[in-house]
Image (cartoon, rainbow, N blue to C red):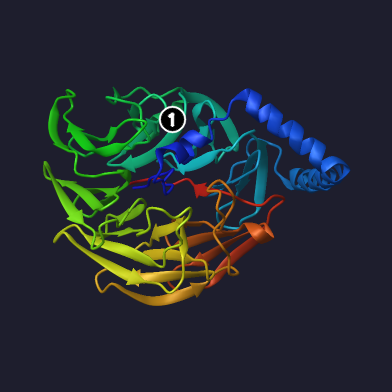
Amino acid sequence: MNTSANTPVKNPAKNPVRSRAVTGAALALAVSVALTACGAEKDKADSAQAGTRADAAKAAPSSPSAAALREPLVATFDGGLHLLDGESLKLGKTIDLPGFNRVNPAGDNTHVMLSTDSGFRVLDAAAQTLTDIEFKGAKPGHVVRHAGRTVLFTDGTGEVHVFDPADLATGKKPKGRTHTTEEPHHGVAVELANGELLTTLGDEEKRVGAVVLDEDDKEVARSEDCPGVHGEAAAKGEAIALGCEDGVLIYRDGEFTKVTSPDAYGRIGNQAGSDRSPILLGDYKTDPEAELERPERVSLIDTRTGKLRLVDLGTSYSFRSLARGPHGEALVLGTDGAVHVIDPEKGEVTRTVPAVGAWKEPLDWQQPRPVLFVRDHTAYVSEPGKRKLHAFDIESGEKKASVTLPDAPNELTGVVAGH
């Protein structure tokens, strides 16, 4: 399972998903000011960058058959997407796409979901082509894959779309279940294997919990004991967890259970789960007044016992630092540049894998910072300061491949079939 837009948000007025919905007038003014300020130096930089992209375009395949990428990866940059071969990291095509775009696996071995200014769009990453499939709506947010279904949550409308990712292969917009929440909000939804739909509760001012609906949209469970609800993850046994400002809310077997943080404000807003482990990995923040808290502890939530354990990494991390390994390992990319491998049962860091240089999380959540993306036995780590992307074998720590990109990568994802 995977969630997206898991951005640490305490103040609804600073909601990162809402913040990117910039008006055309404001964007035009910003561009005008930037062009005036930068002047000839920007023209010179643009010219150099264009030359770099032109060289990359010459190396990219031109025929449809040659254009197919193996295990494709997608890296966003300011104004577009770089598509890469997941084994060699060889750069394929570059697709221009204005605005700040987010990327998530669509749930099959071909497509990637894009969150754009106009809504969710579908990229055929293997064929390196933007499709005509679009789920329009303001402020597209989380994308969740679970139990053979992909679920989209549109923050600006409260609309939820559920579909079978295999249907994307038809080239037409998939038909599936739809639902609209009581009020639009920065939320998330997931459909369980039995057809139940879990979706968050809230409005533009606050978020309070979650509700579960059966296949006829009749309510079967509700909890409003999760202030600031954000993000979700699934553990072994289909325990679904939602992050709260004071712990996590777990739904399993028809009931909600609250796991409370050891601190009065102990926010867990981003989580990573694995179907090989009953223990969830989460971030952990304790300062509600911080402009940007840089925590050095992560949380481990045992869905069997309801116990929460904190692990001190000795280094900070960001909301794009959490992942799970092929055997259920908890993985965290620290600002020390290493991937910290945690045994979730023991609650201990068992080893570290040096990956990139030391870095500092920027204040603006939309600015590039190293990202950890894991697929099977490979950990992909971006290094935007050097415009690089690296691939590591998780077990051995050996670097498998590395590439320098024409632009600093921001978000990173790839095709991921199965849930």
Q: Which residue corresponds to the image point at 35% horizontal and 42% vertical from the top-left?
A: 145
Q: Which residue corresponds to the image point at 79% horizontal and 47% vertical from the top-left?
A: 49
Left or right relative to 270: residue 294? right
Amino acid type indicated by mark 1: Leu
Which of 408/185 is in front?
185
Vertical side of 7 occupied by 285: above or below: below
Residue 276 is situated, as x and y percent measured from the top left of the image, at: 27, 59
Most extreme residue toward the front is 289
Residue 327 appears in the picture as rendered: no
Image-quadrant location for residue 38: top right
- What kind of element bears circle 1? helix
Image-quadrant location for residue 169: top left
Left or right relative to 227: residue 305? left
Which of 367/272 is in front?
367
Which of 283/324 is in front?
283
Vertical side of 161 occupied by 298: above or below: below
